[in-house]
Amino acid sequence: MKILNVYRSQPDETVQKLVEIVNRDREVDTFDLTVDSPDYSNLVDKIFEADQTICWW
Amino acid sequence: MEYKKVCFMYRHEDYVVDGIRSALGLAVENMYSYGVVIDKEIPEIDELTKESIEMLRDMEGDIFTTVQADVEKNDFTAISIEELGEKLREMTHIIPYGAK
Amino acid sequence: MAKSLGIFVTTTDSLQHVIGITKAAKAKGSNVKVFFTWKATTLSKDPEFAGLCDLADDVSICVDSYKKQGFDIEDIPEGLTAKKMATQAQHGIMIEDFDCYLSL
């Protein structure tokens, strides 16, 4: 099971705790959407590679 | 056939009522559908939303909260962040819904 | 064959991300479906919304949300047709029938 965590803002304590539990013993990737010019092509590649994508607040 | 399991998470009071409606929308499509209000006390919900939650529960879904006041006031089911994390591991789709 | 992608939009500040991701996914040959709900239906009034409708394979909005945001349901946003003023069933379709799913 591969999880992709996408962040729309810096994860706060609540999100960090949830991510830690969801990620446990799983293959994990991340993508930061907070940057000025996100590499959407790279994001789509990551979404296609993942079994589940979670886009956090 | 494997049924989808979906969990909506709400952190902004303006998005809770509609988010519950979205959760119900998936339950009627034959999915296990849940909603969780995180760290936010909300005003007492209206009758229509109460009916939506009853329908959701009839279809094996539920609305949870991490806020004790909403367990008492709105009859949501209590859940801790740790329990929520474990529940999310069972989901096929996880939806942080609306604004923070 | 590229995987298909469903994008469920619930936030009002995400249109640029939706467009960017849709453009990138289409460039890879993907089938892209986008559904806007609740406050995100206000994005249908953004000048760039019609361009997204041209780009994606399917774009629809929750008509009940649109009405609750104060719009007249006869006032169909540019890029959509009456049929695309839809219900939450569209969300169900992308979860059941699409390979990949993203909420924004």
Image (cartoon, coloured by chain):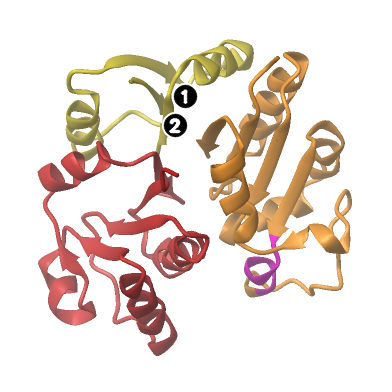
Q: Chain of mark 1?
A: A
Q: Position of residue B99 (x, y in %)?
A: 44, 50
Residue sitting at x 57%, y 12%: A45
Mark 2 vs mark 1, CA separation in Å:
5 Å
| Place of residue C80 in the rendered image (x, y in percent of width and height, measured from the top left) | 85, 53
Who is closer to the viewer here, A30 or B13? A30
Identify the magenta region.
C62-67
In the picture, which chain is yellow? A
Q: Nearer the viewer, residue A36 or C24?
A: C24
Q: Is residue C31 left or right of residue A38?
A: right
Binning the other alpha carbons within 10 Å of mark 1 as few (below 14), some (14 to 19) or many (20 upward) gives: few
**A5 in relation to C81, above or below:** above
Earlier in the chain: of badge 2 and badge 1, it is 2
Amino acid type indicated by mark 2: Arg
Residue drawn 50% across the image and 66% down it:
B28
Using residue C62 as the reference point, say whether residue A52 is left or right of it. Answer: left
Report crowding for label 2: few under 14, some 14 to 19, many 20 or more residues within 10 A (C-alpha).
some
Q: Which residue is mark 2?
A: A8
> Given the image, on which type of amino acid does mark 1 rest?
Thr
Q: Where, by quadrant of the figure, is residue B87 drawn?
A: top left
Marks 2,1: beta carbons within 8 A: yes
Q: Is residue B12 above or below residue A53?
A: below
**Would you identify the image quadrant in which residue A52 lies?**
top left
The image quadrant that residue A29 belongs to is top left
* Shade representing chain B: red
Of all chains in the rendering, the one displayed in orange is: C
How far from the left and from the top, in percent, is residue C87? 66, 64
